[in-house]
Image (cartoon, grey):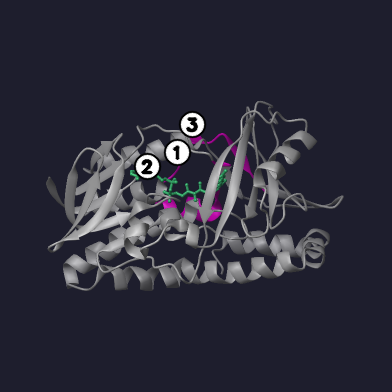
Amino acid sequence: MGNYDVIIVEGGPAGSTAARGCAERGFKTLLIDKALFPRYKPCGGALSFRTINSLGFEIPQEMIEAECKGVNVYYKGEMSSYKKKGRVTVMVSREKFDNLLFEMAKERGCMTLTGERVVSVESSGGYIKVNTEKGAYSARFVVGADGVNSIVSRFINGTSHKEFLSATAFVSRVEEPLSGNEFLNFYFGNVHGGYAWVFPHGRYLSAGIWGLDWLDSKPVDSMKRFLSSNNFSTDNIRGHKMPLWDRRRKICSERVLLAGDAGGFVDSFSGEGISNAILSGRIAAESIADSLKNRESAGDNYKKKCNSLFVNNLKYSMYFTRLIFRFPEFFLKSFVLDNSLLRQYLEDQASNTS
Ligand SMILES: Cc1cc2nc3c(=O)[nH]c(=O)nc-3n(C[C@H](O)[C@H](O)[C@H](O)COP(=O)(O)OP(=O)(O)OC[C@H]3O[C@@H](n4cnc5c(N)ncnc54)[C@H](O)[C@@H]3O)c2cc1C
């Protein structure tokens, strides 16, 4: 059994960012992931303006598959379109993007264990013990960034993600180039409590759906219907549940912090999760550093910073989303027919306005 300052459970965007932040501050850091990297991750691959801003480094040009400057929104035969001067998103393959973040954490001195599944977490004296299928490791702090079925969240919340609000997303890779296409396409009205999308990736497309679980009880059917209506194959569907902000969920204890999907940090309207995964990973490393320096509770610090930087936005997004899907005809029609609302939404995203 090894002793560490910090153990990070997982190497997705949240975990690798937290691991990089801890390792570059000189903490003895261990990152554990059940997967071997590079690993596949079902995703639309859209990195929003917020995500790009929160990274703290430039995405290598060779990793960018497409740059989108505009958005098309469709609803019941109507269409609205808005194009910005600058980019709205960059499109990447998650396999390559996540591997970049993972390698950066390693370069900063983080130790890694891959191909090793975490099975439980427990308190042990003044330490937190992380048990895997192969061994046990302990640390003063643990960052649980192990995604939707988080074992670390179960330790803090005493229950599984199934008890909290969630959505489901599916994606399919379509081998059809749309070269020169600079638009993200969103289709409302096809999915109860969500939307369908088609994103350009240069040499291929990603097509998928996103829907709130309490409004769409048959997301696989919605996905198949959407793919078939576009003459796309239904053979290659991948996806999973995504945890949403829920006031009943604890996001930390004094020395265990939940980051990314494990904390329920996915936006309930857009389904975007990568920016808050990166932001929460960064805040986790800062909160642990502050705690070691000033003897403050890492958990109190983490909660305060997350609330002020993005959790309040998630809360309002949830109210907004519930309202929209309670009266979809009124709100979605307004959104589609009134181009200024779409423009405002995209400008707010770009300027980090709540
Ligand atoms: C179909 C789909 C499309 C999406 N499209 C977009 C998009 O275009 N843009 C966007 O911003 N967001 C998108 N999202 C959301 C985004 O993918 C997530 O919010 C993001 O990946 C969260 O990052 P994370 O680091 O918290 O977790 P993840 O990226 O899920 O990483 C979790 C990691 O934990 C590891 N792990 C899990 N359990 C254990 C365990 N017991 N022991 C050890 N390791 C474990 C896994 O191997 C994995 O590497 C999409 C999601 C889906 C499902």
The residue depicted at 59 percent of the width and 67 percent of the height is: 318
In the foreground, 59 or 35 = 35
Question: Which label number is shown at residue 101?
Answer: 2
Q: Above or below — where is 93 with respect to 306? A: above
Q: CA distance from mark 3 to mark 1?
A: 11 Å
User: Label 3, on which residue?
Assistant: 62
N-terminal-most mark, 3 or 1 = 3
| Distance between the alpha carbons at the discs numbered 1 and 2 | 7 Å
Could you tell me residue 18's position as x and y percent?
32, 53
x, y percent for residue 173? 62, 32
User: Amino acid type of disc 1?
Assistant: Phe
**Where 291 sits versus 221, above or below?**
below
Identify the element where label 2 is drawn.
helix
Q: Residues within 10 Å of mark 1 (few under 14, many from 20)?
A: some
**Is 237 one of the magenta-colored residues?**
no
Q: Are marks 1 and 2 in contact (CB under 8 Å)?
A: yes
Find residue 200 and report its image quarter.
Answer: top right
Stretch of the chain drawn in magenta? 43-69
Q: Secondary structure at mark 1?
A: helix
In the drawing, does residue 311 fall left or right of residue 123? right
Asked if residue 340 shows in the view, the reply is yes
Q: Would you identify the image quadrant in which residue 282 lies?
A: bottom left
Real-space CA distance between mark 3 and mark 2, rounded to the nearest whole angstrom: 15 Å
Asked whether 58 falls inside the magenta stretch, the response is yes
